[in-house]
């Protein structure tokens, strides 16, 4: 199977989930699980799958500038916005934010 520009699979760098993003995931899981634990699990699984795709460079969101001047990239998955920074060796998931909440940008 050929992948990438020269027939190689893109390198996946380390995925680090910040403490705030972990809390965001826990909050999302708990909220959805009130109605359906199975649906909550599927949402979290999908988000984590996208984290890996972001780390590999397979997905590349636009750069955003936060109100405090900080920069990050953003990718949307259904109702959630994933804010992340990617370097050569690491992708840091900064926030996993529900789009219905007050914007953080």
Image (cartoon, rainbow, N blue to C red):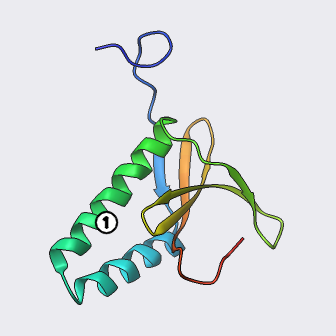
Q: Is residue 75 left or right of residue 24?
A: right
Q: Give the residue at x 33% y 86%.
A: 31
Residue 65: image x %, image y %? Answer: 77, 61
Q: Which residue is mark 1?
A: 44
Q: Is residue 71 left or right of residue 45?
A: right
Residue found farthest to the top = 6
- Please state, as top left, top right, bottom left or bottom right, where the N terminus lies in the image: top left
Q: Does residue 80 show up?
A: yes
Q: Give the residue at x 47% y 36%.
A: 56
Q: Is residue 21 left or right of residue 47?
A: right
Residue 23: image x %, image y %? Answer: 45, 78
Q: Is residue 66 left or right of residue 13?
A: right
Tell me if mark 1 has few (under 14), some (14-19) or many (20+) residues whose alpha carbon lies within 10 angstroms of its own. Answer: some
Residue 37: image x %, image y %? Answer: 18, 79
Q: Secondary structure at mark 1?
A: helix
The mark tally for this picture is: 1
Residue 81: image x %, image y %? Answer: 53, 65
Q: Give the residue at x 42% y 63%.
A: 78
> Which of the two residues, 10 or 102, is positioned nearer the viewer here?
102
Q: Give the residue at x 72% y 70%.
A: 105
In the figure, 24 relative to 5: above or below? below
């Amino acid at each position: 199977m050929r992948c990438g520009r020269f027939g190689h699979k893109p390198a996946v760098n380390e995925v680090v989930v910040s403490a705030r993003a972990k809390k965001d995931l826990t909050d999302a899981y708990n909220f959805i699980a009130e109605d359906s634990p199975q649906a909550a699990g599927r949402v979290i699984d999908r988000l984590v799958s996208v984290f890996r795709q972001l780390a590999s460079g397979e997905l590349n969101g636009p750069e955003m500038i936060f109100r405090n001047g900080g920069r990050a990239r953003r990718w949307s998955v259904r109702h959630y916005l994933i804010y992340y920074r990617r370097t050569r060796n690491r992708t840091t998931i900064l926030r996993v934010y529900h789009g219905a909440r007050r914007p953080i940008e």
